[in-house]
């Protein structure tokens, strides 16, 4: 029989050489380790979790981490990749009691260990940012993840998953003056057939309409794919790169939001400029939809 360490993907094995389990900085997620002799010991956890998590005793699923709420991350050992990795599944303890909740118990979390760590980093960055924005008076309401409208996804099929997840989790996200906001699924749905956005090579995510109509967008061209770009009137179609990827953008924007004097251009999206009414977003929707 293979030892637990031999079942782990190569990247995970390397990770354990540097840190043999323990708590990550990301969302209080704790990884199991080999021969730790404590509550995070791999053998101890596998033996314990095999009593109530399907597939553990059958050795088709291997638990390797637990989050702050008691939900478990497992490898699906039935689907190895060519690199020796395994898809990461999320066993949500919230749905473990009632039989009617069984369809919600398991979900796909990441295609492998490195992607698992990357997703945790994005989630941590998003929480840090929204907390900092609330401190600056932003109105933010989250919702269970909602898919962006099909017309938008069809127009932007290469949209990075992390971007879609972040925006899909937002019901409301605007500053106190309601003239700066992250676009939500409702905003995207307000642009019929996705025809309103003029930048096929860029996917807009954040608007400021109080001065020069600044925007931030995700670049979707092969060169610089996934980077975050910024522009403003009248140079809308000549954006400059602000961050190399979405995660870095969230982290840098969070740092700016926590600063007393944010650097430009983040200051554009963080300063309060009164004078626009709460109907500004509806005006924006009408302008975008009409193609003006």
Image: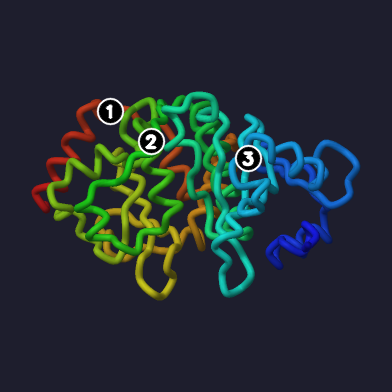
Q: Nearer the viewer, residue 281 or 238?
A: 281
Secondary structure at numbered mark 3: strand
Give the CA distance from mark 1 to mark 3: 49 Å
- Secondary structure state at the residue bearing disc 1: loop
Marks 1/3 in contact by CB < 8 Å: the verdict is no
* Left-right relation of 51 to 210: right
Quick check: 70 left or right of 137? right
Picture coordinates of residue 83, whole percent (x, y): 61, 73
Q: Which residue is mark 3?
A: 72
Residue corresponding to mark 2: 170
Q: Quadrant of residue 258?
A: top right
Q: Is residue 180 visible?
A: yes
User: Relative to 160, is 121 above or below?
Assistant: above
Residue 242 is situated, as x and y percent measured from the top left of the image, at 47, 58
Q: Is residue 273 visible?
A: no
Dot 3 alpha-carbon crowd within 10 angstroms: few under 14, some 14 to 19, many 20 or more:
many
Do the CB atoms of the residues marked 2 and 3 lie less than 8 Å apart? no
Q: Closer to the camera: disc 1 or disc 2?
A: 2
Quadrant location of residue 226? bottom left
Q: Which residue is mark 1?
A: 275
- Residue at 64% of width from left, 70% of height from top? 84
């Amino acid at each position: 029989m293979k030892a637990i360490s031999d079942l782990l993907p190569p990247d995970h094995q390397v990770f354990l050489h540097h840190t043999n389990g323990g708590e990550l900085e990301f969302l209080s997620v704790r990884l199991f380790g080999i021969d730790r002799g404590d509550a995070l010991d791999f053998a101890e956890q596998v033996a314990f979790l095999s009593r109530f998590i399907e597939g553990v005793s059958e050795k088709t699923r291997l638990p390797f981490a637990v989050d702050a709420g008691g939900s478990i991350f497992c490898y699906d050992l039935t689907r190895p990749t060519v690199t020796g990795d395994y898809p990461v599944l999320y066993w949500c303890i919230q749905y473990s009691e009632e039989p009617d909740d069984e369809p919600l118990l398991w979900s796909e979390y990441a295609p492998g260990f490195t992607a698992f760590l990357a997703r945790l980093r994005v989630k941590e960055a998003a929480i840090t940012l929204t907390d900092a924005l609330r401190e600056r008076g932003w109105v933010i309401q989250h919702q269970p993840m909602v898919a962006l409208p099909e017309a938008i996804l069809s127009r932007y099929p290469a949209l990075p998953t992390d971007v879609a997840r972040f925006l899909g989790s937002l019901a409301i996200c605007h500053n106190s003056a309601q003239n700066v906001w992250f676009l939500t699924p409702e905003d995207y749905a307000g642009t019929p057939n996705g025809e309103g956005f003029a930048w096929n090579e860029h996917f807009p995510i954040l608007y400021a309409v109080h001065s020069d109509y600044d925007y931030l967008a995700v670049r979707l061209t092969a060169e610089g794919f996934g980077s975050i770009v910024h522009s403003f009137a009248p140079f809308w179609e000549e954006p400059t790169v602000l961050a190399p990827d979405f995660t870095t953008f969230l982290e840098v924007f969070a740092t700016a939001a926590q600063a007393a004097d944010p650097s430009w251009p983040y200051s554009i999206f963080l300063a309060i400029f009164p004078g626009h009414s709460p109907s500004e977003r509806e005006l924006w929707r009408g302008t975008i939809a009409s193609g003006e």
